[in-house]
Image (cartoon, rainbow, N blue to C red):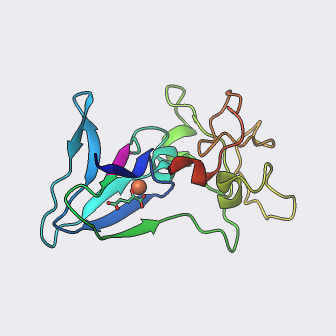
Amino acid sequence: MPGAGASKHTDPSFLTLLLQDHIGGLQVPYHDQWADVPSLTGGLVVNIGDFLKIASNDKFKSVDHRVLANHNGPRVSAVCFFTGVAVPPKIYGPIKELTLKSEENPPVYKDFLVEIFNGSFTEIPSNIEKEEGELSPNNDFYEVNCAHIRRNQKPPGPCTLQDRWL
Ligand SMILES: O=C(O)CCC(=O)C(=O)O
Ligand SMILES: [Fe+2]
C-alpha cells in the first residue's frame, strides 16, 4: 500500500510551481476519482492556491491535490510557493475592480493580512496604515475561518496549516 505523502489539501499560495521527478505520485481529483499527474521531464505543474481563489473572488478555484509517497520508490519534488507578503504588512482580499461596482459579484471574502490568513491575528491591528477606500464597509472585524476568510460564515474552529498534512 502506498503511504500518503501529503493528504488532500489546497495550497495557501497565489500560485505553486512544482517539479516532480519520474516517480510521480501527485494526484488531482478527476471525474470523482484521484488521477495521477504525469511527470514530464522538465515540465512544471502550476497549481492555483487559496490566495488567488480569494483575490479572484472565487472565479478561480484552488486545486485539491494529494501526494502518494512510496508509490514506485522514493520520490523527490521541488515546490515553490508564491505567497502573500507579511512584512511590511499588506492588506489582501478580493480584487476591488472585480467586486466594488458589481452588485452581482459582491466580495465573498473579507480583507486580511497574511498573519490573519495564517491564523496568528484575528483583526487587522490599528497601527497598520489603511489606504483611502482600501477597506470596504463592514470590514472592520475579521474572523479567522481556517485559510478562508469568508464573509457571513462562522469559523469552523481552530485550524492550522499543519492540519492539512497527515
Ligand atoms: O510533492 C509534491 O508533488 C507536492 C507537494 C505539495 O503538494 C505541497 O508541498 O503543497
Ligand atoms: Fe500542495
| Quadrant of picture, ligand 2 | bottom left
Left or right: 146 with respect to 56? Answer: right
57 is within the stretch colored magenta: no
Where residue 62 sits: x, y (%)? 41, 45
Where residue 6 sits: x, y (%)? 41, 52
- Residue visible at 52% across and 45% down in the picture: 54
Nearer to us in this view, 97 or 37: 37
Give the quarter of the figure containing the N terminus: top left
Left or right: 18 with respect to 80? Answer: left
Nearer to us in this view, 143 or 5: 5
Left or right: 96 with respect to 69? Answer: right
Which residue occupies the extreme left position in the image?
Answer: 41
Which residue occupies the extreme front position in the image?
Answer: 1
Query: Magenta span: helix, strand or loop, mainly?
Result: strand
Count of labels shown? 0
Where residue 124 sits: x, y (%)? 79, 54
Left or right: 124 with respect to 156? Answer: right
Where residue 129 sits: x, y (%)? 79, 64
- Residue visible at 77% across and 36% down in the picture: 138
64 is within the stretch colored magenta: yes
In the image, residue 153 above or below residue 125 = above
Nearer to us in this view, 142 or 20: 20
- Residue visible at 27% across and 67% down in the picture: 74
Which residue occupies the extreme right position in the image?
Answer: 126
> What range of the chain is rendered magenta?
63-67
Nearer to us in this view, 38 or 130: 38
